[in-house]
Amino acid sequence: MRGAISLAAALSIPATTADGQPLAQRDAVIFITVVVITVTLAVLGPALPAVVRGARFTEDADEAAEEALAVRQLAHTALVELPALADRFPVPEAIMAHIAKDLRKQAAPASDRTHDQALCRERQISTIYVLEAALLDVKRAALNDLRNQALIDDNVVRRVQRHLDTEEQRLSMRMSLLRSSAHEVGERGDDVDQGGPPPLEGTCG
């Protein structure tokens, strides 16, 4: 509890000296400690949120720029290593091309899109992600129907459920990155495209 240590320290002061005489100013120390604790809890504590709001601290622009740099550098490194990894894993060429396309988007610097175009793109991606989340609910309901009809056993249900959970986690992460990118757009007007779904043609100009 706030102030408990200070109050305990004040109360631990002995009431008398070694020769049995009353210790001077002990009561004053305890009184001052109680007043300070009361003022801190009753006045400064509730007022702190208003002080923070009034300060209007700005976001660290350098931190946002460093985050964007890190994302681009990681994507660039992954893009360089992709051909070697493609030789190690039997992945279809079409899938590798899709992965490479996404990595190139992430590795590219901020494009020349306007602020309005970037926000429009963000709204499109958000709508697609909401649709994908709704489709996950449909899949879960269909899975429950199959179990209730005794067409699949519980082991299969658990395995499929793990796949759906993984898909949901990936979608949640992509939506989180989208919100972060949208906030960056609001501050710097950067492109929000980070390898998400394709744009809806003819809607953002």
Image: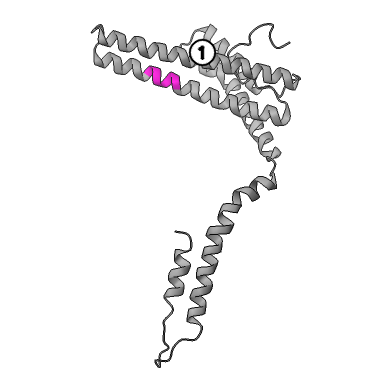
Coordinates of residue 11 in the picture (x, y in percent): 43, 74
Vertical relation: 47 (above or below) 188: below
Can I make out residue 89 in this image?
A: no
- Name the element at disc 1: helix
Q: Is residue 177 left or right of residue 15?
A: right
- Amino acid type assigned to the residue bearing label 1 in the image: Leu
Give the residue drawn at x 33%, y 11%. 143
The image quarter containing residue 112 is top right
Q: What crowding class fits label 1: few (fewer than 14 Cα within 10 Å), some (14-19), or many (20 or more)?
A: few
Give the residue drawn at x 60%, y 53%. 47
Can I make out residue 149 in this image?
A: yes
- Which residue is the site of mark 1? 131
The answer to which of 134 and 41 lies nearer the viewer is: 41
Question: Where does the N terminus fall, quadrant-wise?
Answer: bottom left
State the extent of the magenta-drawn residues as a range. Answer: 163-168
**Marker count (numbered):** 1
Give the residue drawn at x 53%, y 17%. 129
The answer to which of 76 and 149 lies nearer the viewer is: 149
Give the residue drawn at x 51%, y 83%. 25
Vertical relation: 71 (above or below) 101: below
Coordinates of residue 169 in the picture (x, y in percent): 45, 24
The image quarter containing residue 97 is top right
- Answer whether residue 167 is magenta in the image: yes
The answer to which of 83 and 6 lies nearer the viewer is: 6
Coordinates of residue 118 in the picture (x, y in percent): 69, 20
Vertical relation: 71 (above or below) 163: below
